Amino acid sequence: TVIVLDFGAQYSQLIARRVRELGVYSQIVPFNTSAEEIKKIAPKGIIFSGGPASVSQEGSPRPDKEIFSLGIPVLGICYGLQVMSLVLGGHVTCPEKKEYGIANINILRESKLLKGVSDLSQVWMSHGDSVDKIPEGFVTVADTPNCPYTVVEDSKRSFYGVQFHPEVAHSLDGQKMLSNFVLDICNAKADWNMGNFINEAIESIRKEVGDGQVLCGLSGGVDSSVAAVLIHRAIGDKLVCVFVNNGMLRKNEAQNVLDLFGKHFNMRLQYADAEDAFLSALKGKTDPEDKRKTIGKLFVDTFYNEARKCGDITHLAQGTLYPDIVESKSPFGGPTSTIKSHHNVGGLPEDLKWKLLEPLKELFKDEVRELGRELGLPEELVDRHPFPGPGLGVRCIGEVTKERLDTLRDVDAIFIDEIRKAGLYHEIWQALADLLPVKSVGVQGDERTYREVCTLRAVTSQDAMTADWYHLPYDVMQRCASRICNEVKGVNRVLYDITSKPPATIEWE
Ligand code: XMP
């Protein structure tokens, strides 16, 4: 194990996941975990994550100083480097010039950490504070024009620090550096894989559930399907899946999901037709958070209703992934702000009757896909684009009505169909259509029309934390536009969204 000491960074899970990619199990623990507890875990190495705080702020997170006496190698990243420097007797300053974006490191001396990394290698910087005095025993390994201590080390004690973020894809040799740290410096064995994850998850689900019964909201998307199958492996018929038709599903979706699960899996599955309840609760609502919270609450009400049919439920299972959590709340109630209330996290009531079971909450989407394959889920399911819990409700911008949903379902079906026909479905992370809350004037068959406007959006991404808009070929765009205007009654204008994340998010609401 290599542990990630989490100082509240958006990237902590990404670090853990990069370590897992190296075949080494990685676990995240809060920044204030004591040296005593860490000793019990007996990790081969410790990585201090970045974080949003400034070490000069009062109450900013500090690690237990005794960690440095455990004889375990430490790698500090960004805030992690700064806090390590400070605790070991260095100094950190807040210069006027901040540094965000790409830089090239100037390598000054050989280091185990940079083995195989070329001079001027590109790294991703994102920091306000900088170390301006390194602790005794440390030397500078690399710098950049803006940052004198970009890579530092005390190789005797095996303490390393980098000011940039090796875990993000923009740091081109970042994974090489993490590999140098984890496999060479820490000497961790690369013997972890998804098979181990399944065994460990099964054991911990059994322990957590005990004699209880679990209700799992199944949407037919990748996450909840994988969660359901994993939990089913662990506890069999103590799992009840509930598929809620909230009226905001894609075209033919309810039938497809029921058929698929009927065909492949032998689970207890209840179908709840709650379309009317959802649509009447959303009547007149246009604010995105209001809509999300309303939908979240109705899901829970529906689950409560369904639970009455199947005896004592103790746990509610959800396919929550790591990016859902990080964007819905900050891990320490700290400065990371709520971006959206994802329905499977933020919309739950404080006084939920059941305990939550979220076996995928440390994983990223592509890890969940790998897990799904390992569990034997069919490729058509594992490879589906992500679809948000609140469904087309957050894609009908403005008021959600049955009529607008039907229109959007048709638009979405045409868009996805054209992408599949062009052979692009798997190249694209996610493709979605939204209806905008405006109408536009058009002319069709010599007649004036005044109809809805839709936008199409396709993005590429690794984990939904960041995304680039996809350069959809013009001929595909054109086929989509002409089919949508011809075949969907209520639409006379089609736009294509060319914004990346950030600054936009993937969904519009
Ligand atoms: P955003 O729009 O925040 O979306 O960039 C990131 C990814 O998460 C999906 N998404 C959701 N998934 N419940 C979910 O299960 C939700 O409430 C939710 N909102 C967004 C979104 O489709 C994208 O893949």
Image: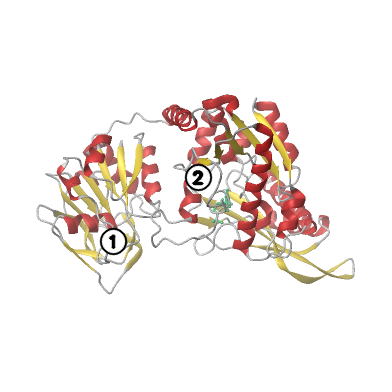
Task: Please tell me the numbered disc located at residue 321.
Answer: 2
Distance (Cα) linking label 1 and label 2? 27 Å
Q: Cβ of disc 2 within 8 Å of ligand 1?
A: yes
Q: Cβ of disc 1 within 8 Å of ligand 1?
A: no
**Circle 1 residues within 10 Å: few <14, some 14–19, many ≥20:** some
| Whether residue 4 is situated above or below residue 87 in the rendered picture | above
Percent of width and height locating residue 351: 54, 50
Query: Horizontal placement of 7 versus 148: left or right?
Result: right
Give 314 or 321, whichever is nearer the viewer.
Answer: 314
Residue at disc 1, secondary structure: loop
Query: Horizontal placement of 365 versus 297: left or right?
Result: left
Is there any visible trace of residue 359 in the rendered image?
A: yes
Give 102 or 17, whichever is nearer the viewer.
Answer: 17
Determine the image quadrant of residue 291: bottom right
Instruction: Name the image quarter holding the C terminus.
Output: bottom right
**Circle 2 residues within 10 Å: few <14, some 14–19, many ≥20:** many
Residue at disc 2, secondary structure: loop
Q: Which residue is mark 1?
A: 60
Q: Type of residue at label 2?
A: Leu
